[in-house]
Amino acid sequence: MNKGIEIFEDVIVWQRSRELVLFVYNLFRGSKNFGFKDQIQRAAISMGNNIAEGFIKKL
């Protein structure tokens, strides 16, 4: 039985974006280049946020 997509957390791409955020945060954990680190981390977070925002606007 396939329940479908009811909430944005059900979207596979959103789930994968969360995995990417964890990967990026771990990858840059020891980086001393704080400006670059911050920019990369914000970009990674932005993907999941944009998916969630697009899903909500569709409702």
Image (cartoon, rainbow, N blue to C red):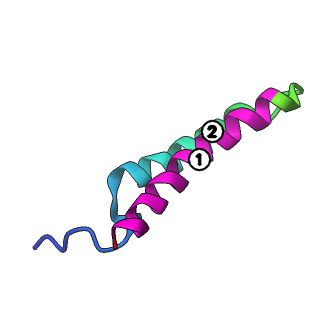
Please identify the dominant SS of the magenta region: helix
Q: Position of residue 28 (x, y in %)?
A: 74, 32
Badge 1 amino acid:
Ser
Which image quadrant is residue 56 in? bottom left
x 34%, y 58%: residue: 11
Badge 2 amino acid:
Ala
Which image quadrant is residue 10 in? bottom left
Which numbered tag is attached to residue 25? none
Check the image and name the residue furthest to the front: 57
Question: Would you call the spot at circle 2 few (<14 residues within 10 Å), some (14-19), or many (20 or more)?
Answer: some
11 or 52: nearer the eye? 52
Q: Position of residue 58 (x, y in %)?
A: 34, 67
Q: Say if 58 sits above or below 34 in the image.
A: below
Question: Would you call the spot at circle 1 few (<14 residues within 10 Å), some (14-19), or many (20 or more)?
Answer: some
27 or 48: nearer the eye? 48
Q: Are marks 2 and 1 in contact (CB under 8 Å)?
A: yes
x 60%, y 41%: residue: 44
Q: Position of residue 42 (x, y in %)?
A: 69, 43
What's the magenta region? 36-58
Q: Secondary structure at mark 2?
A: helix
